[in-house]
């Protein structure tokens, strides 16, 4: 069992209508996804590790990582990334620890 590590989850996914797959030349079949990474301790997320992207053609199942994406797919990725926010639950561990420290501090005055 790992006590600490890094995990990822899909934050947002969209099938673009104006992208043609470079492998099979099919239009409206490329799905662009934003992956969010977070670092965890005892499987409780503590801090965000950033965002990355992946694209996959629904017809030929060809996948591209962010650095291998063609320009048209990369533009769709950056448009999608701008609208994707980092979820608050990526910081659950920090929020809990901060709350416990504040409770401990203010319990002296009550």
Image (spheres, grey):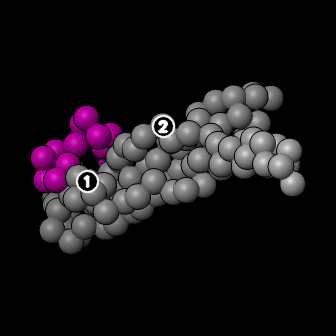
The local crowd at label 1, few if under 14, some if 14 to 19, many if 20 or more residues have their Cα within 10 Å, is: many
Q: Residues within 10 Å of mark 2 (few under 14, many from 20)?
A: some
First-in-chain label (2 vs 1) = 2
> Is residue 74 part of the magenta span, yes or no?
yes
Residue 61 point in image, percent of width and height: 37, 53
Q: Secondary structure at mark 2?
A: strand
Q: Which segment did they paint magenta?
A: 62-75
Identity of the residue drawn at 12% across and 47% down: 71
Q: Is 96 rendered above or below residue 18? A: above
Residue 92 lies left or right of residue 27; in this view the side is right
On-image quarter of the C terminus: bottom right
Question: Which residue position holds label 1?
Answer: 77
The numbered mark at residue 49 is 2
Front-most of residues 109 and 35: 109
Which residue: 83% across, 49% down?
109
* Residue appearing at x 22%, y 59% in the figure: 79
């Amino acid at each position: 069992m790992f006590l600490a590590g890094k995990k990822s989850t899909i934050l947002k996914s969209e099938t673009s209508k104006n992208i043609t797959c470079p492998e099979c030349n099919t239009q409206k079949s490329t799905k662009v996804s934003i992956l969010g990474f977070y670092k965890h301790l005892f499987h409780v997320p503590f801090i965000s590790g950033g965002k990355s992207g992946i694209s996959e053609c629904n017809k030929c199942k060809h996948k591209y990582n962010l650095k291998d994406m063609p320009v048209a797919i990369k533009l769709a990725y950056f448009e999608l990334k701008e609208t994707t926010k980092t979820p608050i639950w990526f910081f659950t561990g920090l929020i809990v620890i901060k709350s416990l420290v504040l409770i401990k501090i203010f319990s002296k005055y009550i």
